Image (cartoon, grey):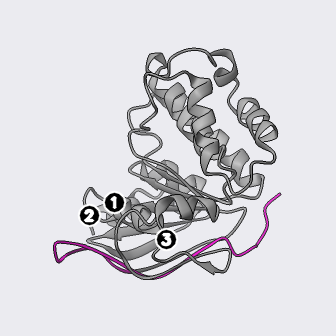
């Protein structure tokens, strides 16, 4: 069941590469039990925002997880504070089995307790991972690899799950399966932050979807905007 616990709070987030701004002072709130979207054209700063939250790139501003600052922490310590990222392109360990990929996801857990219970939850959410547990991850389809990438992130038992382009390269059926799983994850009380190119799909799924242009949030959309072609066109092209 959805809750209104604090979750992720980002204030005045900035990122620059070699002095060139990529993210210019954005604010984000992702409460527990809610899904928030971040959309925009290529190069808008969406992935940079996720990497900054994870501590993978230097940033300005503040990032809080359940009321606790995580600024300046290395990514592995951010994971231990309750944040997991499913990266763009999935990046599963192709030469390892599904089972071993999931085991690696548990390395960053805050506690070693409950690993078996989390694994049961993951394979219930994605039954294909149980069926193919001994198969090399590189032999899975794109949709199956995305399920594995999400399952691996869940093995860290995060409070906040962030996903970068989860629909990239997937068939429509696979996209539906992924977003159905995200709905279940949200209903379990986790905060979900989704970076996506599929604007209509994302706006329909998320409680709020922020539009990022040139590192700045220019618009915030609600689910009822998902079928408004004029609004979606303006969101991407101004």
Q: Residues within 10 Å of mark 2 (few under 14, many from 20)?
A: few
* Residue 233 tag number: 1
User: In the rendered image of this protein, does residue 156 appear above or below residue 56?
Assistant: above
Pick the front one: 35 or 142? 142
Mark 2, residue position: 237
Secondary structure character of the magenta stretch overall:
strand
Task: Please count the marks in the image.
Answer: 3
Q: Secondary structure at mark 2?
A: helix
Answer with left or right where residue 33 lies relative to residue 141. Answer: right
The magenta segment is 1-25
Q: Which of the 4 image quarters holds residue 57?
A: bottom left
Q: Secondary structure at mark 3?
A: loop
Q: Secondary structure at mark 1?
A: helix
Going from N to C along the chain, the mark reached first, 3 or 2, is: 3
Residue 179: in sight, yes or no? Answer: no
Answer with left or right where residue 193 lies relative to residue 72. Answer: right
Residue 49 place in picture, x, y as percent: 40, 67
Q: Which of the 4 image quarters holds residue 234?
A: bottom left
Pick the front one: 31 or 199? 31
Q: Is residue 209 magenta?
A: no
Residue 115: in sight, yes or no? Answer: yes
Write the residue at 17% across / 77% down.
Answer: 19
Residue 186 place in picture, x, y as percent: 70, 54
Answer with left or right where residue 107 lies relative to residue 49. Answer: right
Q: Nearer the viewer, mark 3 or mark 1?
A: 3
* Residue 73 tag number: 3
Answer with left or right where residue 111 lies relative to residue 8. Answer: right
Write the residue at 79% across / 67% down.
Answer: 3
């Amino acid at each position: 069941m959805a809750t209104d616990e604090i979750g992720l709070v980002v204030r005045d987030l900035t990122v620059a590469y070699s002095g060139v701004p990529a993210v210019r002072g954005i604010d984000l709130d992702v409460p527990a039990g809610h899904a928030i979207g971040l959309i925009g054209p290529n190069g808008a700063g969406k992935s940079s925002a996720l990497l900054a939250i994870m501590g993978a790139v230097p940033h300005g501003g503040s990032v809080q997880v359940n009321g606790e600052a995580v600024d300046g922490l290395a990514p592995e310590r951010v994971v231990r504070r309750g944040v997991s990222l499913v990266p763009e392109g999935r990046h599963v360990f192709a030469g390892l089995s599904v089972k071993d990929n999931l085991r690696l996801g548990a390395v960053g857990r805050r506690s070693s307790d409950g690993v078996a219970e989390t694994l049961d939850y993951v394979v219930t959410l994605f039954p294909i991972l149980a069926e193919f547990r001994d198969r090399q991850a590189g032999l899975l389809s794109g949709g199956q690899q995305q399920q594995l990438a999400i399952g691996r992130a869940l093995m860290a038992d995060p409070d906040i799950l962030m996903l970068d382009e989860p629909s990239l390269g997937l068939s429509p059926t696979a996209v539906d399966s992924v977003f159905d799983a995200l709905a279940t994850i949200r209903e379990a009380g986790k905060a979900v932050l989704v970076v996506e190119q599929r604007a209509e799909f994302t706006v329909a799924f998320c409680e709020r979807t922020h539009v990022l242009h040139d590192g700045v949030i220019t618009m915030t959309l609600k689910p009822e905007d998902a079928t408004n072609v004029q609004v979606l066109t303006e969101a991407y092209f101004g």
